[in-house]
Image (spheres, rainbow, N blue to C red):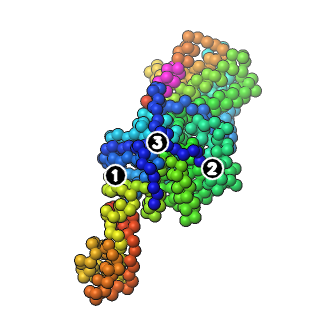
Amino acid sequence: MLTHPAGPPVISAQQLSKHYGDFRAVDDISFEVPAGESFGLLGPNGAGKSTTMRMIGGVSQRTSGRLTIMGLDPEDHGPEVRAHLGVVPQQDNLDEELKVRDNLIVYGRYFGLPMSYLRPKADELLEFAQLTDKAGAKVDALSGGMKRRLTIARSLINEPRILLLDEPTTGLDPQARHILWDRLFRLKESGVTLILTTHYMDEAEQLCDRLVVVDKGRIMAEGSPAQLIRDHSTREVLELRFGSERNTMVAGELEGIGERLEPLPDRVLIYAQDGEAALEEVTSRGLKPITSLVRRSSLEDVFLRLTGRSLVE
Amino acid sequence: MSAELTAQDYALEGSKRPLAALYSRNAKAVIARGLLATRSSNWLIMVSGFFEPVLYLLSMGVGLGALVGTVEGPDGAPISYAAYIAPALLAVSAMNGAVYDSTWNVFFKMNFAKLYQGMLYTSLGPLDVAIGEIFLALLRGALYATGFTAVMALMGLVTSPVALLVIPASVVIAFGFASFGMGITSFMKTFQQMEWVNFVMLPMFLFSATFYPLSVYPQGIQWFIQALPLWHGVELLRQISVASFTSATLLHLGYFLVMIVVGMLLTTLRLRKLFLR
C-alpha cells in the first residue's frame, strides 16, 4: 500500500453528470483528489469511467455539475489544463503515419515544447519503454504490448503533474505489467497525481491510495482498498465446492455460518471474520465439501458485491 | 523524471485571452505533423491527386477539343477548347481537394484513425487543429495548382504572365471550400451522411459552365448556377487566364472572401460539436 501526504485537491468534481440523450453515462458523481494521490476508478464496462476521464481532460463536455482541475475549469481552459496532463487512453491512438520516435517528438510539439528539450527527452522515454531499438520502426510493426508502452511513454513527454491512465495494463503480459507498476510507483513518489481506471483488482490494490467503485454512472463506494474490504466484505472468505449439482442444495444447510453466504454455480462462498472457524462449523454439521479454501477477502469480493455478478456490456 | 512536485505546482493561473479554451496558438505543430506524415507515407496519394485534372485536360481538351475547335473566350476573342476548359478544371481540382481534405479526411481522422483524439489531449485546442488542417489542405492545393499551371504552360495555354495569378486565386477558392467543408462536417455523424457531400459536388462539377458556356441554360437555371460557388471559381480563373478583368472579377473574388469568412465563423462555432463530443 502506498502512503502519501494529503495536499489540497487538484481535481474536484461536484455533482458531475454527462448524458447522451436519455442515457446517463455519468450520473451526479462527486469526488476530490489531493495532490500526489493515486486515485482509482473501478467499475464494470460502461460504468462511466472513461467518460469521467474525458471530462477531466476537457475533451468531453459535461451536461451539468462543477469540475476543476488544478483550480481551472477544463472546458474554459482546456489547453492550459492539458499542458500539465498526461493521458493514456483505453485504446492506443498512436500516429500510425509516423515512426516510433517521431510519435514522441511530434506529440511533444503539440505541447509547444522546443526540439532542444524533445530530442533527449524522446530518447530517455524510448529507454523507459524499452523501445530504443525500435526508434525508427513504423508503429504498425510494433506488437500490442510495445504499442501500449509507447502510448505510456508518450503520455510522459510533457512531464505531467497529473497522469490519467485508462486501463493502462490491459493487454500487457505479466512482466510488462510489473515493469509498468514500478514506473508508475516511481512517478507517484516524485509527486505526480495518478488517476487510473482498471478492471484488475490486484492492480487497484497495488497502485491506488484511494478508489471509488462506479456502476451505471454512480459512485457505489469510496475509500482505500483496505477500508473498502473492511466496509463491504469480511476479513476472510471460505470457498467450498460440493460439486456443481449440490452447491445450491447444500446452501440451505449452511445458513447461519459466517456473516454472509453466496451460493454460486461452481462453489459456495462464506464470508466470515475467521475462515478456519467457519470451516470447522461446516464439518461439525456433517457436511463434506470436495474442496475447501480459506483466503483473505480481496477487492474483487467488494467489487462483485457492489456491482453484481451478471455480465455487463 | 523532474524534481519533486509540491502542492504549489498544482495551482494554475487561467488565461483571459479570447478563445483560450479552443486555441493555443500552436497550429504550426499540426502543420509540422502533416508534413512529416506526408513525407513518410502519404506522398503517393499526393501524386495521384495531381494527375486527375491533368488527365481530364488531356482527354477533353486535346481529344474532345479536336472536334470542338475554338470557342468564345471570356473577352470575346476565340480561344482553343483546351484553353477554355483548363482554368475550369483547375477550379474544380481546387474545390475537390479542399472539400476532400476538410470533409472525408477530417471525418476519417476524427472517427477512425483517432488522430484528433490524441492531439486534443495535449495543449492543442480544436481551433489549432482546424487551422493546421486547413493550412495543409491549402498548401497541397497550391502545389497542385502550380503543377497544373506548369502543364498548361507546356501545352501553350498560358499566354501572359498575368495568367500565373490563377495559382493564388485557386488557393483562395480552395480556402472558401475548405473552411465551409469543415463546418459542414461537424453536422455529419455517419458515412451515409458524408455521401451527401459527393452528391452535391458531382453535378456542381458537371454543370457549372465547366465544359460549355452558361448561356446554353434557360434563365432560371442560369441564376441557380450563378448562386453556386464553383461557377464563380470557374469564371474567376477563366478571366485571369486570359488577363481579361471586369467588375465581375471582383464579384467572383468577393464571393469567395465572404465564403471564407462565413465558413471560418461556422467552423469556429461548431468546433466543440466537431471535436469535443
Residue at which label 1 appears: A217
> What x and y, as percent, mark residue A197?
44, 54
Residue occupying the point 45% across, 37% down? B11
**What's the CA distance linking mark 2 and mark 3?**
25 Å
Residue at which label 2 appears: A125
Which chain does tag 3 point to? Answer: B
- Which portion, as a residue range, is magenta? B255-265
Quadrant of res A73: top left
The vertical placement of B159 against A90, above or below, is above
Secondary element type, mark 1: loop
Check residue B4 for magenta coloring.
no
Residue B185 visible in the shown view: no
Q: Main secondary structure of the magenta part?
A: helix
Residue occupying the point 42% across, 33% down? A76
| Marks 1 and 3 belong to one chain | no
The answer to whether B82 appears left or right of A79 in the picture is right
Q: Nearer the viewer, residue B40 or B150?
A: B40
Residue B82 visible in the shown view: yes
Residue at which label 3 appears: B7
Which chain does tag 1 point to? Answer: A
Q: Amino acid at mark 3?
A: Ala
> What x and y, as percent, mark residue A167?
48, 56
Q: Amino acid at mark 1?
A: Gly
Which chain does tag 2 point to? Answer: A
The answer to whether B52 appears left or right of B8 in the picture is right
Residue occupying the point 62% across, 46% down? A103
Q: Nearer the viewer, residue A177 or B28?
A: A177
**What's the CA distance linking mark 1 and mark 3?**
30 Å
